[in-house]
Image (cartoon, helix red, strand yellow):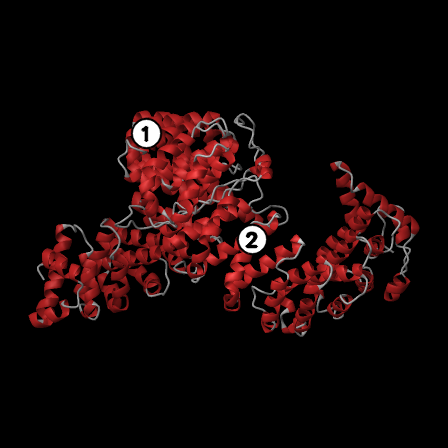
Amino acid sequence: MLAVQPLLPVLSLMIGLQEVAQTKMEYEWKPDEQGLQQILQLLKESQSPDTAIQRSVQQKLEQLNQYPDFNNYLIFVLTKLKSEDEPTRSLSGLILKNNVKAHLHNFPNGVTDFIKIECLKNIGDSSPLIRATVGILITTIASKGELQNWPDLLPQLCGLLDSEDYNTCEGAFGALQKICEDSAEILDSDILDRPLNVMIPKFLQFFKHSSSKIRSHAVACVNQFIISRTQALMLHIDSFIENLFALAGDEESEVRKNVCRALVMLLEVRMDRLLPQMHNIVEYMLQRTQDQDENVALEACEFWLTLAEQSICKDVLSGHMSLLIPVLVNGMKYSEIDIILLKGDVEEDEAVPDNEQDIKPRFHRSRTVAQQHEEDGIGEEEEEEDDLDDDDTISDWNLRKCSAAALDVLANVFRDELLPHILPLLKELLFHPDWVVKESGILVLGAIAEGCMQGMIPYLPELIPHLIQCLSDKKALVRSITCWTLSRYAHWVVSQPPDTYLKPLMTELLKRILDSNKRVQEAACSAFATLEEEACTELVPYLGYILDTLVFAFNKYQHKNLLILYDAIGTLADSVGHHLNKQEYIQMLMPPLIQKWNMLKDEDKDLFPLLECLSSVATALQSGFLPYCEPVYQRCVNLVQKTLSQAMLHGSQPDQCEAPDKDFMIVALDLLSGLAEGLGGSIEQLVARSNILSLMYQCMQDKMPEVRQSSFALLGDLTKACFQHVKPCIADFMPVLGTNLNPEFISVCNNATWAIGEISIQMGIEMQPYVPMVLHQLVEIINRPNTPKTLLENTAITIGRLGYVCPQEVAPMLQQFIRPWCTSLRNIRDNEEKDSAFRGICSMIGVNPGGVVQDFIFFCDAVASWISPKADLRDMFYKILHGFKNQIGDENWSRFSDQFPPPLKERLAAYYGV
């Protein structure tokens, strides 16, 4: 007999159930009346709004789980106790579902069987709520691996579909739909002897059923198997599509929604089958995108997004654009419910504190070291998508967003051919008296910016001033969307003389950063960050004015926008660089940043964006950051130390100590990198007085890739800033670097590669013993297909630098890497890293000239990529080119150089006389 908790004395009666009866339990089990009443009481209490009562109920439920037949009581209340009210019965089923999820494998056999039998008996309950609860319970048991142990479940449910009784048919279909959603993979496997071969033809029969609810279930069941191209469905694909078309005009919106969803998925996986009917499908989807039911319209609108990704998009839609574009544009208006949810009538809310739940978690992007390119002047960081107009508070995806996204992708397909369909609409929308219509026009203008930029240029001199005026519209939602749309045209604005558009735009955007509406503040801050990235040093003359505004916003902003403000300040520092290093600017900017820094606790996630911001500021201010660096440096080291200690504790006592959030350590490592890069040699004293190198050594071996990535970036920066402190640890560091040259982890591998290159330059000939630890992996990476550009470039530079300091060790492998080496480095701009890498390649050619012979044309091309090499490097190039020419003779050389593209030929002749 189990010892009974004093809390529930009556429950001892429940255990009056003799264990002997367990085997025959399913037929003989009867609840004890007192036990039943107590459970009903608990179920009633758990519906109370009082959290204290809920907590106590939770505790009692956990205690009841000790008793083997507690779950029998729950299924009894759900299926047999018809006298009880439905919410209580349903709740009993949902508690049982949670128990099944957590403990099914510990249920005594009899209990599980009893539950299964009761479920199948009651799937046709007259109450829709109870049917749905039983269905959820069935699918939960099924998804816990019990489909294999419940062989009669699917045949029985499929048999019940043929019942004359509507409730039974609907209940069985509801359960089947949930099983298809949760267990699609196993249904299409040999484990169960492929039941779909029977189920799918069965479902198709119900597409024509008289009940709309049943038709909807039938389509939803089959839809689960489209994307995976399930064989059983592909065999019946034509019959499926034919049946779908028959449902196209169904009066039930749920059926229409499922039909649209099916067609969108078929477009991805079986376009061949839709093509013959494509004209009709497009016309149908045009109607559905305007469906009265917004859920149907949203499913239909996805069709245009999916179609835009297919190569046939242009051919299919060309004849329909004049109808489609107005439909999409119309869908971009806020609905009345959107405006209510967005508090569209609230103009001033800057004093209202933010709801903490609304603040999305911030994820820190670890530091990645990249090369600069000729054409852009920025590292090849992946561009972050500027999401179409961010209405956070509405459900994330709605018809407005989907229509705008569809217009955006179609603009990228049709380019300027879209404009004849859209310009007449825009004229009407942008100057419309109703703010909702005008606002949608501004969104349209932003959505087409990327795809139709060329064709829009003639209209921009008129449109940009109009938009700048809209920045002071009296409706906050108009002001906020205008910020976003203007940011989409920032590139063009910056390409014009600054006084024409940049200055007025900047002036107005800065006013909007101080708007009295929080949504506008947020949109303006984000737009200004985009403008900063485009304008870079064009902003230098206005720095005082910009900083004035951003610093003022510090005291004005609520929590959420403060995090976006940090980003705008960090981006400003990245964009203007050392121009920020003026005493007056430092005195404006640093005190509020340091004040926030001092206020925040070490556990506060707001440290992430602030540390990122300070990292950019430190790199930009260089020596100007010196007065602030010691406390910042010290705290970063402490954050790393704290996180590592907590991780060790968690490793040894996982029950007592929870795992730390390693993002704190990652952001701290990145800020230390920013300090090392900004302060250079001035950081030496701080490094000398701290244990950062041993902490970094631990981080380099962390299980989490992002931690290793940031620690290798820091290693490279410390190597450049104060190698005297790094050098004693090189024997420990190099083997770890070697094991991290694994391109499965692109960014870790990239930063490790870069750090090896920086270490080589400092070590010189002493690098010899370490070359074998890394060279083979580097050569393998540079020859790998589909390696990202940044990694290829860093790998080429590091191989070149190793060859520069240890040519004898690296040159024998020259032939294995010379070709990809040359093609990787031809596009990066002249700089110190490129210089040392090319000196290395020249030294290696001196040691092993045969290694370059087969690919000499690639070497010529790489040499020609230099705009202005230093004199002695140019001299090395000259000697190698002329040496090769003399070796093969004039006649062979002219035959060889006839293969060169004309620009290459001219360049080599002009610079090197060959």
**Between residues 452 and 51, which one lies in front from this camera angle?**
452
Residue 750, image quadrant: bottom left
**Between residues 261 and 720, which one lies in front from this camera angle?**
261
* Residues marked 1 and 2 touching at CB (< 8 Å): no
Look at label 1 and name its amino acid: Leu
Residue that numbered label 1 is attached to: 543
Q: Quadrant of the C terminus?
A: bottom left
What element does badge 1 sit on? Answer: helix
Q: Residue at x 67, y 54 (%)?
A: 252
Look at label 2 and name its amino acid: Gln
Q: Position of residue 544 (x, y in %)?
A: 33, 26
**Between residues 912 and 388, which one lies in front from this camera angle?**
388
Assess disc 2: are there few (<14), some (14-19) or many (≥20) residues with their C-alpha within 10 Å of its C-alpha: some
Is the residue 809 above or below the residue 396 in the image?
Answer: below
Q: Quadrant of the N terminus?
A: bottom right
Is the residue 458 above or below the residue 274 in the image?
Answer: above
Give the Cα distance between marks 1 and 2: 52 Å
Q: Total label count?
A: 2
Q: Which mark is residue 287?
A: 2
Q: Position of residue 382 (x, y in %)?
A: 39, 50
Q: State left or right for residue 690 relative to residue 825.
A: right
The answer to whether residue 187 is visible is: yes
What element does badge 2 sit on? Answer: helix
Residue 796, image quadrant: bottom left
Pair 1/2: label in front: 2
Q: Position of residue 323 (x, y in %)?
A: 48, 51
Q: State left or right for residue 608 relative to residue 416.
A: right
Assess disc 1: are there few (<14), some (14-19) or many (≥20) residues with their C-alpha within 10 Å of its C-alpha: some
Q: Residue at x 11, y 55 (%)?
A: 911
Q: Position of residue 646 (x, y in %)?
A: 54, 45
Q: State left or right for residue 41 relative to residue 794.
A: right
Q: Earlier in the sequence, mark 1 or mark 2?
A: 2
